Amino acid sequence: MTCRPSEVNIIQKECKEDEHRGGGLLVYMAAISDRYTCATFQALVDAVIPPTLGLCQAEYVPGAMNWCIHEFVIMEVDLSQDPHVATQANVPFSRTTAVLLDIGAARLLRIRQSIHPALYQPSTGGGLFSSLSRNDRLRAVELLNRLDVCLRCLPLPYRNNPALIQTMMNSLQQLTLFGFYSE
């Protein structure tokens, strides 16, 4: 699955029109057109809910990536960003979260706890996290959740913010499940 920048542009245009009409709705969807962020979130949702074979092994059951749940998760992550939290200028929360996932993947490989290194072909534009196998991606998320990374080396707003890291790691999995099972 690929992200659809044309749909993002339409949503942004509609939101800006709403804002000019006094509705005050501002939805930041630029991250969906960012290939790196999109590929990283595709890999994330694919690890949480992969496609499977049905009970009879004759039917294919699509996973979260097949339903473009990554777009929902990106949107929710960006909408959850508190404007008062320090971030790098004009960097969406989803982008820094994608970087955080890559840092978790690098740490997993550094401590040699990868089960199946590089068995998964990364999506176009993805980083290290998206190149891991499904099991290893989940292990990287768990490693971040355990705070087994250098907290002062992380991008803002995650730098020295263990509560935010743990909240985000739990939220990513919950948002994937919520998005998938509400479709």
Image (cartoon, rainbow, N blue to C red):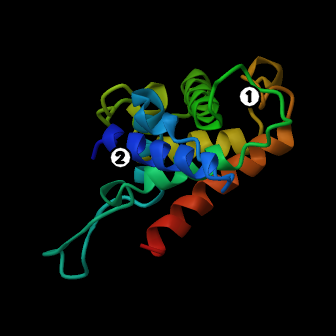
Q: From the viewer's perspective, is residue 180 above or below residue 76?
A: below
Residue visible at 86% across and 28% down in the picture: 160
Task: Tell whether 165 sits left or right of 104.
Answer: right
- The part of the image, by quadrant, that contains residue 88 is top right
Q: Can residue 90 be seen at all in this image of the molecule?
A: yes
Q: Can residue 132 be seen at all in this image of the molecule?
A: no
Residue visible at 74% across and 33% down in the picture: 148
- The part of the image, by quadrant, that contains residue 52 is bottom left
Disc number placed over residue 108 in the picture, else none? none
Q: Which residue is mark 1?
A: 149
Q: Report the amino acid beneath label 1.
A: Val
Q: Who is closer to the viewer here, 118 or 172?
A: 172
Task: Tell whether 144 sits left or right of 101.
Answer: right
Earlier residue among tags 2 and 1: 2
Q: From the viewer's perspective, is residue 7 above or below residue 34?
A: below
What secondary structure is marked by label 1? loop
Q: Report the amino acid beneath label 2.
A: Glu
Q: Who is closer to the viewer here, 151 or 40?
A: 40
Q: From the viewer's perspective, is residue 131 above or below residue 179?
A: above
Q: CA distance from mark 2 to mark 1?
A: 36 Å
Q: Which residue is mark 2?
A: 7
Task: Quarter of the image for the C terminus: give it.
Answer: bottom left
Callout in the foreground (2, 1): 2
